[in-house]
Amino acid sequence: MFEADRSRTPARTMFGQMELIYHATVRNIRKSHGNALIGLLLSIVQTVLLICVFYFMLNIMGARGSAIRGNFVLYVMSGVFMFMTHTKAMGAVVGSDGPTSPMMLHAPMNTVISISAAALAALYQQILSATVVLYVYHAAIEPITIYQPVGALGMLLLSWASGVGIGMIVLAAKPWAPDFIGIVSQVYMRANMIASGKMFVANMMPGYILTWFDWNPLFHTIDQGRGYIFLNYHPHYSSISYPLKVTAVCVLIGLMGEFYTRKHISASWSAKR
């Protein structure tokens, strides 16, 4: 009975890994609150509160007149949704189970499953939040129209993927310097409140200010996403290729770093913490 099962084909192995990722994703979703429904509602409330904060902030700053011609609330939502998706994906990956986690004591479990499950759980929560908020606003307050919904969804997914890539680099580096890396990740996520450029329109920004935001892949996905959402906006100072390249490079570096860390890490590293 303890003999290894040699009849497993690559297809069965792949489906087995997918099943593990599914169950681990469900576990991650339920982990935020004892009641899964309340956990999802809290995620929706957090998104709504951030939209309200930026709505009133932009009104107070007098930035409403410089926004894209169209629904102003949709303009605010477009930035908040992609910012939240990027940040939550990064935070979920950084907080996923590492090589020394008790979950890794179970033979089928590995860090790839843990990272995938954390990232998919964050994506599910953010897509659900965005869908609910958009539907409630459209049905109860004011009808809205998204010019190219498929392209807008693509930019949301790219925001998520870039967050996953950056999170993988942070996750691989965290065991070597936990305190320092924790501070760096928090600074990055807080700085993105401004550095993502969600409060600004790239086409209206002067060149010397544009360089402060151009390095950020989230800035490009938000600006390109608004090009798909609004009929009257055509992005000139952002691209889709840049965040794609950054995401691919970050995922590759993150995988190499995670492999190296997994081969050298020991549970004794955090024994005195």
Image (spheres, rainbow, N blue to C red):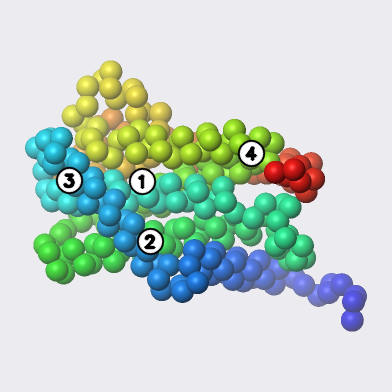
Nearer the observer, 41 or 248? 41
Label 3 Cα crowd, 10 Å radius (few <14 / some 14-19 / many 20+): few
- Locate residue 46: give its quadrant: bottom left
Q: Earlier in the sequence, mark 2 or mark 3?
A: 2
Q: In this image, 41 relative to 228: left or right?
A: right
Instruction: Kindly identify which residue carries mark 1.
Output: 83
Q: Are marks 4 and 3 in contact (CB under 8 Å)?
A: no
Picture coordinates of residue 61, whole percent (x, y): 15, 35
Q: Residue, x 64% and y 55% (percent of image)?
A: 97
Q: Which residue is nearer to you in this view: 225 or 109?
A: 109
Residue 234: x and y in percent read: 21, 39
Residue 233 screen position, x and y as percent = 18, 41
**Mark with earlier residue (1, 2):** 2
Query: Which comes sooner in the sequence, label 4 or label 3?
Result: 3
Does residue 182 appear left or right of residue 98 in this picture?
A: left
Dot 3 falls on a residue whose secondary structure is: helix
Q: Under tag 2, what secondary structure?
A: helix
Question: Secondary structure under badge 1?
Answer: helix
Q: Which residue is mark 3?
A: 56
Q: Residue at x 76, y 46 (%)?
A: 271
User: Which three-letter amino acid code belongs to the residue tagged 1?
Assistant: Phe
Type of residue at label 2?
Ser
Can residue 109 be seen at all in this image of the molecule? yes
Name which of mark 3 and mark 1 comes first in the sequence.
3
Mark 2 highlights which residue?
43
Marked residue nearer the N-terminal end (2 or 4): 2
Q: Position of residue 114 (x, y in %)?
A: 62, 58
Residue beneath disc 4 = 178
The residue under the point 13% across, 51% down is: 71
Mark 3 → mark 1, Cα distance in angstroms:
17 Å
Few, some or many residues within 10 Å of mark 4 (<14, 14–19, 20+): some
